[in-house]
Amino acid sequence: MTFDAFHTALLWCAVINYAVLLLWFALFAFCRGWLAGFHGRWFALSPERFDAAHYVLMGVYKLGILLFFIVPYGVLHIVK
């Protein structure tokens, strides 16, 4: 894989992952009841724990995007 191809791949991975994060947030914000009922079939979670779990996991996912895609993209952009 060439330098430019890797640079472009990191950018597209970041864009796609942010789209997934925005979709997750939209589902959580606008379809929370349905989402809680869907997960409630498998897990016995209180509404507070359900909200906290999604909030924490969205933060971890966003941090992963930053660490694995945005920072390497920025470094390669500086090095280039």
Image: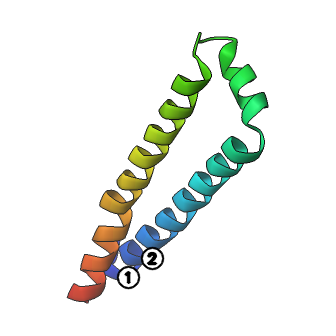
Q: Percent from the top left, x then y, of residue 5?
A: 41, 76
Front-lying residue, 72 or 23:
23
Residue at horizontal 49%, vertical 45%? 58
| Picture quadrant of residue 37 | top right
Instruction: From the viewer's perspective, tell me whether residue 23 is left or right of residue 59.
Output: right
Q: Residue 52: image x %, image y %?
A: 49, 33
Q: Position of residue 35 (x, y in %)?
A: 72, 30
Q: Is residue 42 left or right of residue 49?
A: right
- Quadrant of the frame with the N terminus: bottom left
Residue type marked 1: Asp
Would you place residue 6 above or below residue 34 in this image?
A: below
Residue topped by disc 2: 8
Measure the C-alpha gap from mark 2 to mark 1: 6 Å
At label 2, counting other C-alpha atoms closer than 10 Å, the crowd grade (few under 14, some 14-19, many 20 or more) is few
Q: Is residue 61 above or below residue 15?
A: above
Q: Amino acid at mark 2?
A: Thr
Q: Secondary structure at mark 2?
A: helix
Q: How many circles with numbers are drawn on the protein? A: 2
Q: Which residue is mark 1?
A: 4
Residue occupying the point 39% across, 45% down: 60
Q: Residues within 10 Å of mark 1 (few under 14, many from 20)?
A: few
Are dots 2 and 1 in contact, CB under 8 Å?
A: yes
Please, is residue 9 above or below residue 17 in the view? below
Residue 8 x/y as whole percent = 45, 76
* Element on which disc 1 rests: helix
